Amino acid sequence: MKFPTARTRDAFPIYGQLGIHSGPPAKVFRLPEIALEWPVTVPAGVGPVPGAGPRADPLSTEAQEGFRFLKDIGRLLEEATERVRDAVADGKVATYIPELAKADPALVGIAVHTIDGDTHHAGDATVPFTLQSISKVFALAALMRLTGPAAALDGMPCEPSGDSFHSIVRLEEESGHPRNPLINAGAILVSSRLPGANRREMAGVVEGLLASVLGASVGVDDQVYASESATGYRNRALANYMQHFGLLRNAERACEAYFTQCALSLDAVGLARAGLFLANGGSDPISGTRVIDTDSTCSILALMAMCGLYDQVGRFALSVGIPAKSAVSGGILAIVPGRMAIATYGPALGSKGNSVAGMAMLEFLSRELDLSLFR
Ligand code: GLN
């Protein structure tokens, strides 16, 4: 697995401090090297784009005007973490995956990475957490890269569900078809389509995409994986339901691959860096590597905007106004197209399963930096 280029490391001294680069912690296992190399062979028209790389002028003059970003961002991020420290008392850590219940609900962190290479973080942004539902975005990207966006989304109407992330009710009403790939049923269907003979190889496709951007392998938290696998009856119910309707062939393997990808572990700094290609039309602006094509990127961002925070996504659109994906581990990845990726961490969750601190910090930042796409 290649390390970041000298250029990347020089430009981002913080990068070397990430746990992800200093080898996995003891309880983390490495996914095996799998058959797929990145970049993999992809459909015509999806390959590297000539001249892809850092944009010479990533921000328009107009954007820069409303964007007192560079000089103020460090202070703003500090302020964001301080403002929400008390609010975390309103939330609770997830317990239905027993291992997640061990998280400290007081943790609050935020990291920002701009497409022109600026990076800042505040609070507990270097505490690793499992990606959980945020991994759905990267799994979808990995599948789209292999099959193109239409085939990856086959069988899913791509409408918001209005239900909780693990709801089964619409599967019965809609003949086993998940509403979208960011609720659990849809994400399990996506995972079932990843190539590989077993869970490690299938989740390894997702890890391969992350590693190709980060320049280092990403560990799976084996204890969180085992904890979800031992208790994931509800997800197995969703998968079996879909198998009954012929949408997938091996419900158990699909769930195991999904549980494994959900246990991929990064900190907020690494997550913002990993998601940066989504803010840059699908190519990583730091290395110049094309990760996915522009159509796939547009589809993923649209899905995040419509379905990324479950049945709280409407309120989030009003108050923050950017595509985002939340996770029960307390992470949120938010993308400001053409500008930056933001990752927040705060394991105390509200009643809809979204990080209380993360949502509040993103609302604050959106207001301060005028980030809403709807302005
Ligand atoms: N692995 C978790 C689950 O399937 C992910 C859910 C989430 O982060 N919202 O329940």
Image: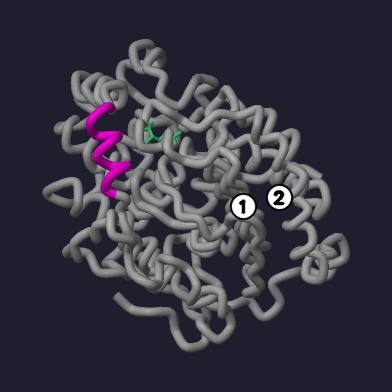
Which residue, given by chain and number where applicable, does mark 2 sit on? 81
Q: Estimate the x, y position of residue 232 in percent, counting from the top left.
A: 28, 27
Secondary element under disc 2, as helix, strand or loop, is helix
Kind of residue indicated by mark 1 = Gly
Q: Residue at x 43, y 66 (%)?
A: 19
Q: Which residue is mark 1?
A: 109
Q: Which mark is residue 299?
A: none
133 or 120, which lies in front?
120
**Residue 74 position within the rendered picture, expressed as x and y whole percent measured from the top left:** 75, 65
Residue 137 seen: yes
Give how far across and how far down residue 309 sits, in percent: 56, 34
- State the residue in front, 280 or 326: 326
Residue at 62% across, 47% down:
108
Q: Do labels 1 and 2 touch, CB within 8 Å?
A: yes
**Residue 45 visible in the shown view:** no
In front: 105, or 318? Answer: 105
Q: Residue at horizontal 24%, vertical 34%?
A: 229
Using a 10 Å C-alpha cutoff, classify the residue at mark 1 as few (fewer than 14 neighbours), some (14 to 19) or many (20 or more): many
Q: Earlier in the sequence, mark 1 or mark 2?
A: 2
Question: What segment carries the magenta color?
Answer: 222-231
